[in-house]
Structure formats: structure tokens, C-alpha cells
Image (cartoon, coloured by chain):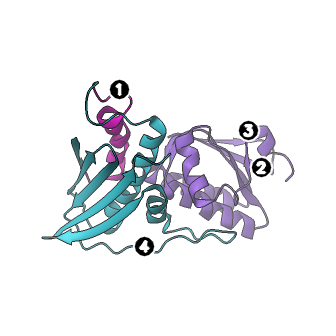
Amino acid sequence: MSHTLVLPAEHLELRRLRSWLEKSIGPSAHAEGESVGPLDLDLIGKIELAIHEVATNIIDHADTSGQNISIEIHQSPLVLRVELRDHGKLAALPLPGELGAHPRVRGYGMMIVELLASRVAYHRVDEVNVWSIEFDLTAS
Amino acid sequence: MALRIGKKDVAVETITVTGRLDAVQAAPLRTTVGDHLNQGSNRLIVDLSAVEFVDSAGLAALVIGMKRARLNGGDLRLVAPGHPDARRVFALTKFDDVFVMADDLELANKGW
């Protein structure tokens, strides 16, 4: 089962993510008998934050002003995969933040994504940046 | 999000944030916190109890303020968010151990 959302590459537009996710994969999203079940709100919150952080990274670093970000969800019984596509410049990954008593103030976004997801990957194909985030739906 | 600024007494400033503390709202929060620090107020409380969502940009705004306040001999404390989607970022990054986080404003005001 797949769902797609296309957003202008602007921070304010990311506020549409939550309602789209709930409508697409939330507790009331699926009918009985479908091969995949609805996801609980806690997991949807984690998925929203991960997508939000990747999209924020795109907006802040990929020079996508005036462009769109395409977000696709592919759900199977075991894995939910999110793919974000943009036509911005080649991604330059920020360094992860440093935890502890002397915290840095930048670079937490992608670290948060890595902590939330079971797999994060980036590749560039034909001038398109593709971020892939996977969530293990069998994890407790 | 809305920012409301209150003053408990001459020493402690309270900034109340509501809604979503995301990249959109991080900038005005950084400005507000920075204004207080520039004016010599180095004991700040940011009340996040009515915040629904916090992202890394919102977290960064708070961390910058906290670091500046501590360098000035004060602190930037938090009233903890009640919503799990707002608490998540603090737990993931372990900043819930770095900030002084209280369950309500009264507790946040104690023991300066």
C-alpha cells in the first residue's frame, strides 16, 4: 500500500505531515481485510518526526526554494518505507550532534532520524535526491 | 505557536510557548530568549507544557539559550511538555538530562 504527498519546500508546509500520516496510515486509515494494518499514534509520531527532520534538512541545505518535496509511503506487513525526493543540490550531511554535558547546537536532525528509523539511506539519481527511511513494524 | 512573556519577579522571566516548536517558531523564540539575555536577564523559564511538537530546530533554540544563560551565571529551565510528541526529541537526544525540566511552573521557579 502506497501514499504520496507533494509539498512546497517550505518549513510551514511540513505542518501538513501529521494529518496526512493519520489519514494514510493511522488508526482509522485501513479497512478490515487489508494486508497491512493501521499504525498507532505513538509510531505515527515517530514517523512524522523522522520525515519532518529529513524534509527540514532538505529545505535548509539543498537550495530547493520554489520547488517541491515528494514524500511516498510504502507499507508492507513488516516494514514501512518512506522516500523523500527533491531536485535540489547534492546533499551535504551535517555532522551528528554531540550528546552529553557540553552539547552542540547543530546537527541533531539527522541524528534524530537515525535513532528513530531502522535504516536511513541517501542516493542521487538523475539530479534527484532520494532519502529512504525504513521503520521495522515488528519492533515492539 | 504563540509566545507569551511573563515576569514572576525581577529575577526570573517566563516565556510561554504553545503549539508547535518547529523550524517556523524556533527563530522568534531565539530572538525572544536572546533579547532577555541581552537585557541582563539570565534566569529564564520556557514553559512548554502546552507544546504539541518539538523538532531539532526548536531544540537548538533552547540549547543556545541555555548555554548563553549558563555562561552568564544563570540558566534556562523548562516546564516539560505534556505531549509525548513534544517530549520525544528531548528523550532521544538525552537533553532531558541536560536541561533542568520541571513538571510545572511553580517547581521550575524553585531553587535558583
Q: How much space separates mark 4 and mark 1, taking CA atoms? A: 37 Å
Q: Nearer the viewer, mark 1 or mark 3?
A: 1
Q: Which mark is residue B104?
A: 3
Q: How much space separates mark 2 and mark 1, taking CA atoms? A: 45 Å
- Residue flagged by tag 3: what amino acid is it? Asp
Reading the image, the residue beneath label 1 is A28
Check disc 1 and report its element: helix, strand or loop. Answer: loop
Q: Is residue B41 visible?
A: no
Q: Which mark is residue B12?
A: 2
Are labels 1 and 3 on one chain?
no
Chain that appears cyan: A
State which tag comes first along the sequence, 3 or 2: 2
* Residue A139 location (% of width, % of height): 46, 48
Queried whether the magenta region covers residue A9, the answer comes back as yes
* Residue B34 location (% of width, % of height): 61, 60
Reading the image, the residue beneath label 4 is A94
Q: Colour of chain B?
A: purple
Q: Nearer the viewer, mark 2 or mark 4?
A: 4
Q: Which residue is at the front of the view, A35 or B94?
A: A35
Check disc 4 and report its element: helix, strand or loop. Answer: loop
Chain label for disc 2: B
Vertical relation: B26 (above or below) A33: below
Are labels 2 and 1 on one chain?
no
In percent of the image, x 66 and y 54: which residue is there?
B96
- The magenta region covers A8-31
State which tag comes first along the sequence, 4 or 1: 1
Are labels 2 and 4 on one chain?
no
